[in-house]
Each structure stands twice: as structure tokens, then as C-alpha cells.
Image: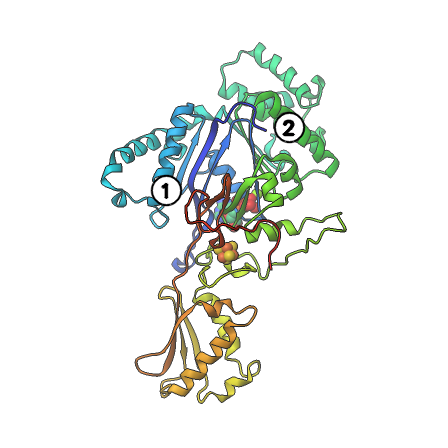
Amino acid sequence: MITSGEHVLLFVSHLRKYFKQSSVFKALRTEIRALDDVSFALLEGETLGIVGETGCGKTTLGRAVLSLIPATSGDVYFNLPAEEMSRIMELDRKFEPYYDPEKADFDESKIPADLKGEFEEFLKLRKKNSLTRKKQSAIRGLRRFMQPVFQDPMSSLDPRKLVKDIIAEPMRLLTDLSREEITDKLLQIIKDIGLSADHLYRFPHEFSGGQRQRIGIARAISIEPKLLVLDEPTSALDVSVQAQILNILKDLQFKMGLSYLFISHHLNVIRIMSDRVAVMYLGKVVELASTDRIFEEMLHPYTKALLSAIPTIDIESKKTRIILKGEIPSPANPPKGCYFHPRCPVAMRNCGWSPRDLREPLRIMLDPTRNPEVTDMKYTVEEIISNEAENIIEVNFGENVTVDQDTLKLFKDLIEKESLMDEGVVFKAIDTVERSEDGSKIVITMIEPDTPKLKEVRKGHFVSCLIYDYNYYDENKPEEIEYGQEVN
Ligand SMILES: Nc1ncnc2c1ncn2[C@@H]1O[C@H](COP(=O)(O)OP(=O)(O)O)[C@@H](O)[C@H]1O
Ligand code: SF4
Ligand SMILES: [Mg+2]
């Protein structure tokens, strides 16, 4: 629902949040990539749904946008004059080709001389406006315009305070409204959320879950913000109560022209509430489009799998549930290339396969109980060592062995055969199979994988997948693009 023109209220660029996990043991200190290079814009009056399985980074995104936690890198622009916002977005897009994920910043050294002036302008605008570059004291003034609503209203409402004081708190802290004005506002808001004046003089524990969530919403809208970040606002409630809360949110949005960042792992709730939807996987946005496109003409293989899980009442529907193999990998140690590749039903050889993916399939290939041809090999395998940094796997036959040409050939044939199997794509990502210099090992080198970027594949439809590795305005994009449900 876009009620007030096409003005962008919120623009997020390359936002990251890595949590450092401390440990007394240096080797156990890790970084959790909770939010990994997320970009999007939110229009005034619009709802952008954020959907994805638990742990994919939705809450972290909401908190980083609101500056409730400091971002590791990237930028958040909020509530700027229209002209300044569009200039920032224009420059951000212009310098996009020079963004270096390794540096988590634009690579100044690569910017052509004729763009240096504009780049300077961009850096100045960024420093002046991005919330991630402001001091907390400067952000406090903006809190008035962006407010969170959390999943569990009980834990976010102070149990010792009367409801009137809970709702009034942001007005007291963030506005200079008088006592009388605050009282008037309280009476109006309590009606807006479907409760009555006498509810103001009760404590949170006297209310049901749904009523408490109404109070949480009243508190958030009391200061007339422009943006609400709603983090699973109805996930803790019964279905019948959910619908009431969702209706209130829709009404308020219409009346107040609010923008919503609506976070939920419930696909049906996302579908009802959102104008556009961003699908997240392992800290990244993998697809972003209008709600209709996401639900009817989704492109990303993960979105297809996620949406195939929605139960359908349509008996005619040929939709089959796509069961993904394996578990969601840990954000402390994400896969190479496309983070989705180990589970993707249509992964290709360049999608990110690395030694860690090949190790186990190789072990199975070399297990004589599973693969009798291995018994033809003259030597037995002592160990398989994968080296992620050098992108190689070494198959060690022991110090005294010199691998001969026949063994090398047999080994290559086995790999060739595996690569033709259904699950054999990881073997297709092998570049060379050679003997080590001393002849005691076979060294497998894998191809350098590609990493997909979020690209605008159709107007307003963004996908991060190497199958759709072009922009809709590219001249050499393919003519026929298949949309919809068909995965394998
Ligand atoms: N404060 C924190 N410290 C360390 N890891 C965190 C912290 N908050 C979240 N994470 C991790 O970041 C990832 C994303 O979490 P979260 O944003 O809560 O996902 P979601 O809301 O989609 O379930 C998860 O792996 C989670 O364990
Ligand atoms: S890039 Fe696309 S095809 Fe390749 S693994 Fe990722 S989602 Fe699958
Ligand atoms: Mg969450």
C-alpha cells in the first residue's frame, strides 16, 4: 500500500552484522555472520515483508536498521529530504560496481578519475546521513520516527507500570508534549487499538497476549513515527487473535501513512501484510519482489523450496513439496560462493563447491564396500586432506607409494563416473587431478567458484542466483526466462 507517492523512507546499503564469539581458546573465537551484505529500500506507506527460516538474520536486520545494535559495516539512511535520498541512492547505484565485499566498502582505488568528484560527494553524504556512522546521541533524535514492536509483548512491557505510563513513556522521553496533550493522546490511542479508557489504569499481567500486543503497538505509535519494525508481532498469538492484530496494523498504516518492516517466518502472514517481500537465507537477501511475484513467479531455488511448504487446498494444484537436503549451515562458517549451494536442487558446477563439500563424497567414492571398482586400485588410501585456503584436496597413499599412470587414470575415471550421477555436481567442480611432485599423492584442484549478487532480473524483481546472472536492462540478457514453480 503506497499512499504518499514514491518517496523512499529507508534505504539500506550493504548492511552487515557479524557477532564476535569470544572464547578463551583463540581457535574457538569465531564470527557469526548474522547479517551479510543486505541492501533494500522501503517506500513511505509501504510494507516490506522479511521472511526466512529461524536464524536467517531477520531480527538482527530489524535491530541493526533501528540502530539498537551497531552494524559491522554498511549504511542505513532514514527519513531524509526526498532529493538528498534520491541522490544518495543514485550514487550508491553508480558506485555499486566498485563495492568490494572483502573490504566491506567501496574500493576507492578502483574508481575512475572522472568519477572521483562524485565519489567524494557520496562519501560526504554518507558520513553526514548514514545512521551507522552517527553517534548514539545523534540517533536519539531519530528514534521518534522509528519504533520497534517485538514478538513477546510481555517481556517488552514493564510489569510494574500502569498501562498509561507504559504507553506514555516514549511521548515523555522523545517529545515535548505537555501533560494534558499526553493524556488526550492516550485516550485517543487506546481507542485506536481497540481497548478502552479504563484499561489505562491496569497492569500488563491483567491482559491477554493479544491485548498486550495492542499495548505494545500503542506505545510504538504514540509518538507518530514513520517506520515500525515489527518483529514477529503475531507469532506468539492464537490464529484468531493474530487476525485482529493484523487488521489493527493495516488500519493504523492507512490512517497514519506508516511504513512497515514486517518480519515473520509465517508465509501466510507475510503474504497478507506485505506489498513487497524480501526472502532471507543465511544472513543474505536472496530474492526481493512484489508479494505477487514472490508467491506466483518466484525465481530463486530457495524461495521455491520455502514456498512449496505452504499447504494448499487446491487438489488440482501440481505443486509438490521440495524437500531440501541437509541442514542450514552455520553462519559462523558459511559455504563458499552461493551460501545455498550445498542444498540447492539445481546447483551448477560454479555455484561454490569447495574442498569441504568434496571431502565426504570422495571418501564414499573411495570406499571399496560401496564402490567395488576401487578394489582394482593398486594402493589403499591412507588419508584425505582438504585444504580450503588453497582449494585443493590431497589423497594420500602413504610415503612409500609412487602413484602410477594406471592408478591416476582409474582415479580420473571414477571421478568422471561420479560427476554423471544425480548428486554428482560437486565432482563437476573439479578442475584438475594430478600427481604430487613426489608421486605419493593425488592432488585434486577445484575450480574457483562464482558468488551471486542480488541483481534486478525483471523490473523490481531482484534475485541472487547464478542462473539469473544479468540485469533486466543488460543488452545481452537471455530472451526466454522461465518463471514460476518448476524446479527439477
Ligand atoms: N547477540 C548475538 N550474539 C551471537 N550470535 C547471535 C546474536 N544474535 C543473533 N545471533 C545469531 O545470528 C543469527 C541470526 O539470528 P536472528 O537475527 O535472531 O535470526 P532470526 O530472527 O531470523 O531467527 C543466528 O545464527 C543467531 O544465533
Ligand atoms: S547460485 Fe542459484 S543455482 Fe547456484 S546454488 Fe545458488 S541458488 Fe542454486
Ligand atoms: Mg527473530
- Secondary structure category for the residue under label 1: helix
Residue at which label 1 appears:
96
Pick the quarter of the image with the N terminus.
top right
Image spot of residue 481 (x, y percent): 53, 50
Element at label 2 = helix
- Cα separation between marks 2 and 1: 35 Å
Residue lying farthest to the left in this orientation: 113
- Res 162 seen here: no
Q: Is residue 400 left or right of residue 343?
A: left
Which quarter of the rendered picture does the C terminus lie within?
bottom right
Residue 355 appears at what percent x and percent y? Answer: 43, 67
Label ID, residue 250: 2
**Mark 2 burial class by Cα count in 10 Å: few <14, some 14-19, many 20+:** some
Say what amino acid the circle numbered 1 marks: Glu
Q: Is residue 186 above or below residue 290?
A: above
Residue 208 location in percent, x, y?
72, 32
**Image-quadrant location for residue 393:** bottom left
